[in-house]
Amino acid sequence: MTAGRDTQNRSCAIRPAMPADLAAVEAIVCDAYGRYISRIGHEPGPMLDDYASLIGDGYVHVAVRDAVVRGVLVLVPQVDAMLLDNVAVARAAQGTGVGRSLLEFAERSAMAAGFGKIKLYTNEAMTENIALYDRIGYVETHRAEEKGLRRVYMVKSLSGN
């Protein structure tokens, strides 16, 4: 990682999403996931979510740089772990550290909430995402089809962090 990217990382603020962020959140999700429609044959699961409700429930955080929302994170506490339900970065901000900041924030939030692990699922056709999660310590637990979506489930232990 270059020094320039480190500086950009530090200038990325992560905060709870507000109702006024709804349009930006939806636009980023469409921007980040729209490219997968042709690969999987329909809209990916995150494009179908009700972000107004998720924001209202306090599950959505946004990454802001230069007063513009650049990324979205949806964290949902569950009984046994924190679910990283969605992480999306606007294409124009990809490769600038926003995604890394959101993933690190997710892990810190899970630990602060008392969870020893964080879990996620992604579409099996999103192979680059699976490879990324594998590189940063997530382990595949199983695969299943739910709601017409072929999902890969992964988990990361946070006890060593």
Image (tube, grey):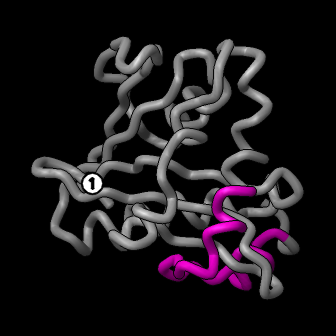
Say if 118 sits above or below 132 in the image: below
Q: Is residue 81 left or right of residue 33?
A: left
The residue depicted at 31 percent of the width and 57 percent of the height is 76
Q: Does residue 137 belong to the magenta stretch?
A: no
Under tag 1, what secondary structure? strand
Which image quadrant: the N terminus?
bottom right
Say if 25 sits above or below 47 in the image: below
Q: Position of residue 138 (x, y in %)?
A: 41, 37
- Crowding around mark 1 (Cα neighbors within 10 Å: few <14, some 14 to 19, many 20+) is many
Q: Position of residue 99 (x, y in %)?
A: 65, 57
Task: Provide the residue designation for mark 1.
Answer: 82
Q: Does residue 23 belong to the magenta stretch?
A: yes
In this figure, what is the number of numbered marks? 1
Q: Which residues are magenta?
A: 5-27
Quadrant of the rendered structure where residue 35 is? top right
Quadrant of the rendered structure where residue 10 is? bottom right
Q: Is residue 41 left or right of residue 109?
A: right
Farthest residue in the left direction?
79
Q: Amino acid at mark 1?
A: Met
Say if 120 sits above or below 21 in the image: above
Which image quadrant: the C terminus?
bottom left
Magenta stretch, main secondary structure, is helix
Q: Position of residue 102 (x, y in %)?
A: 56, 63
The residue depicted at 54 percent of the width and 39 percent of the height is 48
Q: Is residue 17 left or right of residue 75?
A: right
Q: Position of residue 90 (x, y in %)?
A: 78, 56
Say if 76 sits above or below 108 in the image: above
The residue depicted at 48 percent of the width and 52 percent of the height is 50
The residue depicted at 61 percent of the width and 69 percent of the height is 22
